[in-house]
């Protein structure tokens, strides 16, 4: 795992986006797997601006690593986020858009369908955000490091974060999510973890200065050479040791 320390959210978004831009420009058939939520919003903004200025994404495949269980058009779904922050804002569409179906009654069947897509489209990049409890995707604390795509139950802190992020009441907030496991996350050629804000500082300290343990799921990335964690000053504010920045 490598770290890049940046000043603030905007710089984090810029650095993260540069990696996406490079993949789009250098790969013939780029495959990018995104995350949703507050962390990647700025990156999406830069991506949309570039596409509308002519960045060619006609050969690109864009997918996501997870989806909340709930109605397709709910305000919190990954689907809604992706349309509002990317697909509805661009004239030229990517070659393929893949989304996990959070309305699936038979989740095993949906997992098998999505795994088929993952096998057919090896990912050049997986973008991730960090939960305040250290989760990645919906791999909550306690998830074994050999997890494969599964139906996850959210921790209380994750439910609270979703309520805050989407301004919704608890009774309307999803409690489960279909998510890639650590196994599929780490199969991507590059993994980018975007971390910004004071509310992430405890998780960042556990990630960079704690033990490798399923209590802090993001530590599953520790031994992965191809992971780049981009951390802003507020998120890094509890760190006590010196850490190298790329
Ligand atoms: C959402 C997802 C989550 C978020 C994480 C951080 O698709 O996979 O793991 O990345 O909860 O959320 P934000 O960025 O809103 O702080």
Image (spheres, rainbow, N blue to C red):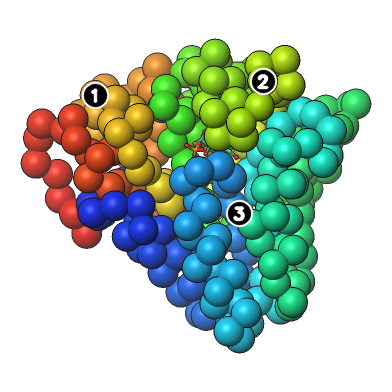
Crowding at mark 1 (Cα within 10 Å: few <14, some 14-19, many 20+): few
Q: Is residue 128 above or below residue 153?
A: below
Q: Is residue 142 above or below residue 139?
A: above
Q: Nearer the viewer, residue 178 or 194?
A: 194
Q: Residue at x 62, y 64 (%)?
A: 31
Indicate which disc, 3 or 1, sits on the residue closer to the N terminus.
3
Secondary structure at numbered mark 3? strand
Q: Which residue was labeled with disc 3?
A: 33
Q: Residue at x 50, y 68 (%)?
A: 46
Q: On the image, which quarter does residue 166 sit in?
A: top right
Secondary structure at numbered mark 1? loop
The C terminus - image quarter:
bottom left
- Is 129 positioned to the left or the right of 181 in the image? left
Q: Residue at x 28, y 47 (%)?
A: 232
**Residue 24 visible in the picture:** no
Indicate which disc, 2 or 1, sits on the residue closer to the N terminus.
2
Q: On the image, which quarter does residue 95 sit in?
A: bottom right
Q: Nearer the viewer, residue 214 or 196?
A: 196
- Is 26 positioned to the left or the right of 243 in the image? right
Q: CB at mark 2 closer than 8 A to ligand 1? A: no
* Alpha carbon separation for disc pair 2 and 1: 34 Å
Label annotation for residue 210 = 1
**Residue 238 visible in the picture:** yes
Q: Nearer the viewer, residue 141 or 109?
A: 141
Q: Which residue was labeled with disc 2?
A: 169
* Alpha carbon separation for disc pair 3 and 1: 28 Å
| Closer to viewer: mark 3 or mark 2 | 2
- Is 154 positioned to the left or the right of 121 in the image? left
- Residue 62 percent across, percent down from the top left: 67, 61
Indicate which disc, 3 or 2, sits on the residue closer to the N terminus.
3
């Amino acid at each position: 795992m490598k770290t890049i320390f940046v000043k603030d959210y905007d710089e984090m978004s810029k650095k993260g986006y540069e990696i996406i831009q490079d993949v789009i420009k250098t790969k013939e058939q780029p495959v990018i797997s995104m995350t949703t939520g507050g962390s990647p919003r700025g990156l999406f903004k830069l991506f949309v601006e570039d596409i509308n200025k002519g960045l060619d994404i006609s050969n690109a495949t864009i997918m996501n690593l997870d989806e909340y269980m709930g109605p397709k058009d709910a305000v919190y779904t990954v689907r809604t986020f992706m349309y509002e922050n990317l697909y509805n804002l661009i004239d030229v569409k990517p070659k393929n858009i893949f989304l996990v179906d959070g309305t699936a009654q038979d989740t095993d069947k949906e997992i098998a369908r999505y795994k088929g897509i993952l096998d057919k489209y090896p990912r050049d990049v997986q973008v991730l955000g960090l939960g305040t409890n250290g989760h990645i995707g919906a791999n909550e604390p306690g998830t074994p490091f050999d997890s494969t795509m599964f139906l996850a139950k959210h921790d209380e802190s994750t439910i609270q974060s979703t309520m805050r992020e989407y301004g919704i009441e608890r009774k309307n907030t999803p409690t489960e999510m279909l998510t890639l496991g650590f196994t599929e996350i780490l199969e991507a050629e590059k993994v980018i973890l975007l971390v910004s804000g004071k509310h992430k500082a405890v998780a960042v300290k556990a990630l960079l200065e704690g033990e490798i343990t399923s209590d802090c799921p993001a530590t599953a990335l520790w031994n992965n050479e191809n992971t780049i964690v981009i951390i802003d000053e507020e998120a890094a504010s509890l760190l006590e040791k010196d850490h190298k920045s790329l």
